[in-house]
């Protein structure tokens, strides 16, 4: 009888799987590093806005343009400010990716308002908690739809709070379903804090 040849196929398969998992992990780490570098660059660009903007509206416009320009996958960004005298959130700035390639920015529907608790933005403001929404969400009816309005595939609604004062909401829209990994959620929440400080510079002036 001839000697039995050892079967190494199982060991080789396990090694291949291990190598594949290692490569995937390294790729993920590399992607997160690049994302963190972009995030730091974006934060730097945001922090100089109070020194250059003349008023709240200009600051909000520069914030929305900066986020759409600097971050991956974002289709649009808007900022709504809470007006106590009429108990409404009012749109003061909006910027979409398409606005990077036209001479005159549309700036969104400046007559758009929400009551606290109304729609995704109103819910985020009222609860003072971020809302990460997409079209497959059970709460898809939270999006306020009007004729001529763009409806996002996915949307992050982030409360803007400075020195304990709720000031408004920042909305960031995405063109694909479920873009909100835990890492991306943490980044967006961090950015909302930076943006709140920028907006607060103008709203909280004595």
Image (tube, rainbow, N blue to C red):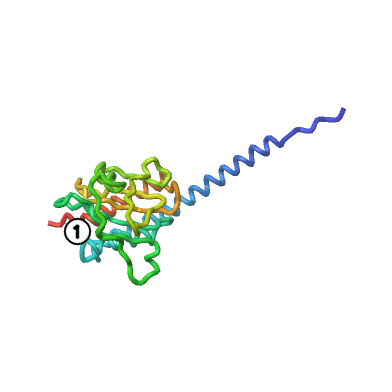
At which x and y percent is residue 2?
A: 86, 30
- 168 relative position to 5: left or right: left
Instruction: Identify which residue is drawn at 64% across, 39% down.
Output: 15
Image location of residue 172, percent across then percent down: 35, 53
Query: Residue most toward the right?
Result: 1
Residue located 12% across and 56% down the image = 206
Please provide percent x and percent y for residue 174: 41, 53
> Could one spot residue 42 in this view of the protein?
no
Residue beneath label 1, please? 202
Name the image quarter holding residue 98: bottom left
Among the 4 quarters of the image, the one containing residue 103:
bottom left
Question: Which residue is depicted at the point 48% across and 48% down?
Answer: 29
Please indicate whether residue 30 sits to the left or right of residue 167 in the image. right
Q: Is residue 110 left or right of residue 156?
A: left
42 or 88: which is nearer to us? 88
Please state which of residues 3 and 38 is positioned toward the viewer in this rendering: 38
On the rendered structure, is 173 left or right of 109?
right
Badge 1 marks a residue whose secondary structure is helix
Mark 1: give few (<14), some (14-19) or many (20+) Cα within 10 Å. Answer: some
Extreme residue toward the top, this view = 1
Q: Along the line of sight, which residue is nearer the eye, 61 or 45?
A: 61
The front one of 39 and 124 is 124
Q: Name, please, the residue furthest toward the bottom.
A: 103
Furthest residue in direction left, as rendered: 206
Residue 52 sits above or below residue 127 on the image: below
Res. 87 in view: yes
Q: Measured from the top left, where is residue 52 in percent x and y?
A: 25, 66
Instruction: State which quarter of the image contains the N terminus.
Output: top right
Numbered disc total: 1
């Amino acid at each position: 009888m001839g000697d039995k040849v050892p079967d190494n196929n199982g060991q080789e398969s396990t090694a291949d799987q291990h190598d594949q998992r290692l490569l995937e992990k390294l790729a993920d780490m590399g992607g997160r590093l690049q994302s963190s570098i972009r995030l730091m660059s974006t934060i730097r660009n945001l922090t100089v806005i109070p020194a250059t903007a003349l008023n709240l509206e200009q600051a909000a416009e520069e914030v929305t343009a900066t986020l759409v320009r600097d971050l991956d996958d974002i289709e649009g960004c808007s900022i709504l400010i809470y007006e106590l005298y009429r108990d409404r959130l009012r749109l003061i700035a909006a910027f979409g990716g398409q606005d990077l390639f036209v001479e005159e920015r549309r700036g969104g529907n400046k007559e758009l308002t929400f009551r606290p608790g109304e729609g995704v933005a109103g819910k985020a403001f009222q609860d003072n908690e971020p809302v990460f929404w997409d079209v497959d969400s059970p709460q898809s009816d939270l999006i306020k739809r009007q004729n001529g309005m763009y409806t996002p595939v996915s949307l992050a609604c982030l409360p803007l709070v400075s020195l304990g004062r709720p000031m408004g909401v920042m909305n960031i829209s995405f063109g694909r379903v479920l873009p909100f990994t835990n890492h991306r959620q943490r980044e967006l929440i961090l950015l909302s804090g930076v943006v709140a400080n920028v907006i607060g510079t103008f709203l909280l002036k004595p």
